Amino acid sequence: MNEEAHDPITGTPKYMSISTLLGIQYRSVITDIESFFYVMLNALRSIYSTGLHETPVGFGFQRCLRALGYIRATSLIREEWLADFGIERGKLPSKLLHILGAMRRFLFYKDGEYIGYCLTEMPPYEYPVDEASAKAYKERRKALVSSAIDISTVENFKAFLKRFGHGQKYQTFVSRYKGLFDDIAQVAPSVVDGKVIPNQHGLAESYLPNYPNALTSVGRSNQARLLACFKELVRAMGEKAAASDAPEMPYRCEDYQNMPVSGSAHQPDLVFVCRGERHFTIGAVHMPLEAKVLRNTGDIDDEDLGQILYYVQAIWQTQVTRMFVPVLFLHGSLLSLFVFTRNESIRVNIGDVFVAADEPSLDAYGPIGTTLLNIYFLLSLSPGEFGHICDFTQTPDRLYFAPRFSITGADTSQSALVSASSRWRDGSIEVVFASRFERQVSLHGRLTRIVKARYNSQDVFLKLSWLATNRIPENAIYDILASNHVQRIPRVYSSGLLIESFRDYRLDYMVMEDCGTSFSNALAMLNPRRNPSFVEVLKRIINDVTSCLVDASVVGILHQNISDSSIAIRTASGRLSACIIDWGHAKDTCWESNASRDISRKWNYDSERVGKTEEDHDLTTGTAEYMGISTLLGVKYRSVITDIESLFYVILDALRGIYFAGLDEAPIGFSSYEDPKILGYVRAPCLYRNKWLVDFGINPRGVPLEILNILEAMRRFLFFKDGEYIGLYLIQESPYKYSIDEASARVFMSKDTIALLKDRFSNSES
């Protein structure tokens, strides 16, 4: 199915853009932003309503989409446009009014002139290029390139496939189907100096009937011709293979040169998607292809690499089952393959797809037949064989997990199997996806994918974690905590090791209970101005968190990534309580103990290797805005006090959203810097000042006295000793020797927690 030919009116009518309502096929990221604009208006009209009983005109006439498009085009030029969308202007806060006005101007004005009526016509309106946005895009691309691992080149395609476990299968395929595509190769055009030239030998083109059109279409650029020829070549190989006993190609090739792939702002030249996919998004792309008509003779340049990396990041971001991301790069006559794992960037040249000479001899076509065989082998591998952790014919909406030993009969500790389509009889569970939990992902390194799902009629989270094999898996941390009866951690319903080692990374899964909302969301919903129990609830939550962190430290576990999202708030037994999640960055300080070694055998990791790596690894792990001063400055030593300091910043960040200090920019205590050390240097003197709260964006005049007392007690507990400020000692390379200030601790901790802290620091901490 061709995306360019499908019904363009897709989506929810009341959120559709003007051009979409009027059936104009062209889409861009601006279309999505316009839809988001209507989502905002619809949400705000329920809060700041004009009081009308009937549906406002801006959201009416949904049975006649074109009428709604014309109505909106007129409404959005009016001064009273907000009323047309059911919102009373006078009720809106000034900052919100400013945001809505800015979005309206961004979407519907150019150089002060209204363009709403232009959006109702064909051809599609061409939005002006925003030079600032273009510059920002280039800067992001540059940052993406600098964050990528240097690309290593594999000598040949066979060696590459051997690395990925397909060497024997490839050898069998080549020996059986050698020469299958030689007749197609004989009619290949030439690609020389950026020009696509028809075959000069007058050979029969029965296998590629669309080649002449691809080469002679009036107004078509050489790059468009190159891609049309490649797409025709893929089609011809599929037909030839189908007429033989060669394996079927489970993908189809789609053209996206002129429009973004749905769900993204990206326009790969071609994409391969599973044949079962219908209305697909970027989350269903198996392998994108980027093309340049000029041949790349050396290293790929940063502009092309940056574009490829954008696709890679989008695919990691949206595809839960990803194992690695392959991208094809057609440059001139040569086709290269890039593969990005969590630990590597690899390039291999598959071979010449077209002839690299303008007057080639017949001998020049021979190697092309081999290249086509290589391409077809690659495209015959199923998703589960190349790029994903399991097989599927279209993007899965559920996964099945089962202990490996119950299926194979072999006891392999916590090893497990995963499938997208088949449930095993013995011991398997089904997890049905509800929605993805959005997180920004990096190109390489640790990766956690979280999906909100249903399991046994309960709301759960499915967590899939890629982790270096020399680090401790989160499942092992939960095992240690649960076996030692540490409270206020989530219940784990099912967990296992899916991949023990792939390119030095392992993959674990976990199905855990839904623990509620984030700390800041919970405080905002409580609304202290209308909830007299706000202070008591806040104290109880702080007590819950400190109790959990200290209990965990007693059994050797430090969280090391306390943030707003790692403190989940839920209702239990009729009252709000905290649950600490996201232990993926945690450290086991007791890795030499017998208990830890038992856990390591269960979860298939080397406790000694992991323990020593944990002591020497990159010290600035976690979320920078919540890191302790010493952590920001790279001091090795960590303790539960470091986690409590992170909790302190989480509380300040949440409260500044309620007791806003009225600053026009981020307060210096929460400002972002390229080097995290700068934030550490800034915080050290800030926390000494009498007006320190303003430096963290909080207006103390509006804060209840009891909350001020809690914050001051935490500040004194963390940064003072015997009345002397110690913040400046925390920026030194040697760790500061803490002692427990009981008087301050009693304000926000329980007696039992204080006793455990005192015992721990007097016996083992320095």
Image (tube, rainbow, N blue to C red):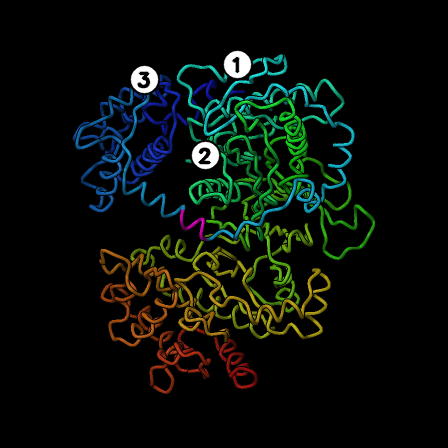
Q: Mark 1 points at which residue?
A: 212
Q: How crowded is mark 1: few (under 14 residues within 10 Å), some or many (20 or more)?
A: some
Question: Quarter holding the N terminus?
Answer: top right
Residue picked out by circle 2: 263
Numbered disc 1: secondary structure: helix
The quarter of the picture where residue 187 lies is top right
The amino acid type found where label 3 is placed reads Met
User: Mark 2 Cα within 10 Å, few/some/many (few <14, many 20+)?
Assistant: some
Whether tag 2 and tag 1 are in contact, CB under 8 A, the answer is no
* Coordinates of residue 100 in the picture (x, y in percent): 25, 39
Q: In this view, does 622 lie above or below 183?
A: below
- The circle drawn on residue 122 is 3
x, y percentage for residue 395? 59, 34
Q: What element carries label 3?
A: loop
Residue 198 as seen in the image, left or right of residue 114: right
Q: Which stretch appears magenta?
A: 142-146
